[in-house]
Image: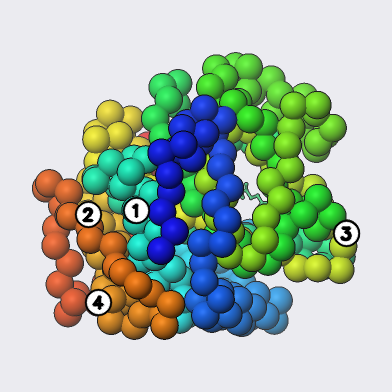
């Protein structure tokens, strides 16, 4: 199993992004590709997942929210991937809790663009709050890969906001770099690093799964959600690890050992709770 190195963690902390090569093995990649295609087909046919799929600036579907809640064979097991657990533990700490997931897809010929942005409500302080982006397809400049502005996660809120407002769709920044990747690679992007992507005019599809995670200590400080949101999501993560353990891939050589953070519940396998744990239902505002 590939494990993130200390040098890679340093690069991520310094630059706000990092590419990890070949983390997802071919057997898992094949299941993930075919299952995600099934969900995309369901969206394009106006099936149940479509109601949960956002459109981009061009009006094209591209962003399936609450991925685990759309019945599928791959997303919980992917969340339970041991390399992902290991890197979350090492960068964030043992109390990480996966809080959100989505499937982003850029359709061939008319794949949505994503303007320069930071994710969520940017806070002033700099914690390692980041997304794990798992690529199912090659992502290149040609098919609308993500661009990042290295070190911009260290900028102040006003400085970043000025760029976001000025250059919404202008990717010709001399300091921007394309995060080109291959299927099975992982991109880590800090939620405060400026990032975005151009429209896909090429013939190729590109799909990526996003996992976002937080900790109870950050939530206590920034008051994003009522505590129950984290307790439900902590149970979801334990369920994901259970799915991976009980339905492993042939390529699995180990499992991630998660210690349930203090004051968080232990999941009971008989507790078959709703996987659509919505942020807004638990938001403080
Ligand atoms: O995958 C992409 O092109 C960017 C997606 C993104 O940054 C977002 O949806 O917040």
| Among the 4 quarters of the image, the one containing residue 63 | bottom right
Residue at the left extreme of this rendering: 263
Q: Of label 4 and label 3, which has the lower sequence position? A: 3
Whether residue 237 can be seen here? yes
Q: Is residue 170 above or below residue 246?
A: above
- C-alpha distance separating marks 1 and 2: 21 Å
Q: Residue at x 58, y 80 (%)?
A: 30
Q: Nearer the viewer, mark 3 or mark 2?
A: 3
- C-alpha distance separating marks 3 and 2: 42 Å
Q: Residue 86, labelled with which disc?
A: 1
Quadrant location of the C terminus in the rendered image:
top left
Q: Residues within 10 Å of mark 3 (few under 14, many from 20)?
A: some
Q: Helix or strand or loop: what does disc 3 sit on? A: loop
- C-alpha distance separating marks 4 and 2: 14 Å
Q: Residue 201, labelled with which disc?
A: 3
Q: Residues within 10 Å of mark 4 (few under 14, many from 20)?
A: few
Q: Nearer the viewer, mark 4 or mark 1?
A: 1
Q: Residue 272, labelled with which disc?
A: 4
């Amino acid at each position: 199993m590939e494990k993130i190195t200390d040098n890679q963690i340093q690069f991520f902390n310094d630059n706000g992004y990092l590419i990890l090569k070949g983390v997802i093995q071919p057997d898992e990649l094949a299941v993930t590709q075919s299952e995600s295609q099934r969900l995309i087909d369901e969206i394009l046919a106006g099936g149940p997942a479509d109601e949960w799929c956002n459109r981009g600036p061009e009006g094209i579907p591209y962003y399936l929210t609450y991925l685990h809640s759309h019945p599928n064979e791959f997303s919980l097991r992917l969340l339970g991937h041991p390399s992902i657990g290991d890197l979350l533990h090492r960068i964030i700490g043992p109390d990480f809790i996966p809080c959100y997931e989505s499937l982003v897809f850029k359709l061939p010929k008319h794949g949505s663009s994503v303007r320069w942005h930071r994710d969520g409500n940017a806070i002033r302080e700099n914690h390692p709050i980041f997304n794990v982006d798992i690529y199912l397809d090659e992502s290149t400049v040609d098919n609308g890969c993500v661009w990042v502005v290295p070190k911009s996660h260290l900028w102040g809120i006003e400085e970043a906001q000025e760029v976001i407002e000025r250059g919404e769709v202008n990717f010709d920044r001399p300091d921007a770099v394309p995060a080109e990747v291959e299927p099975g690679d992982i991109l880590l992007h800090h939620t405060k690093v400026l990032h975005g992507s151009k429209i896909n005019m090429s013939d190729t599809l590109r799909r990526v799964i996003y996992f976002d995670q937080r900790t109870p200590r950050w939530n206590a400080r920034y008051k994003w959600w009522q505590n129950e949101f984290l307790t439900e999501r902590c149970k979801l993560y334990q369920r994901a690890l259970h799915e991976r353990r009980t339905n492993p891939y042939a390529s699995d050589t180990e499992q991630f050992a998660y210690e349930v953070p203090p004051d968080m519940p232990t999941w009971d396998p008989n507790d078959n709770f709703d996987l659509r744990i919505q942020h807004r239902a638990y938001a403080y505002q």
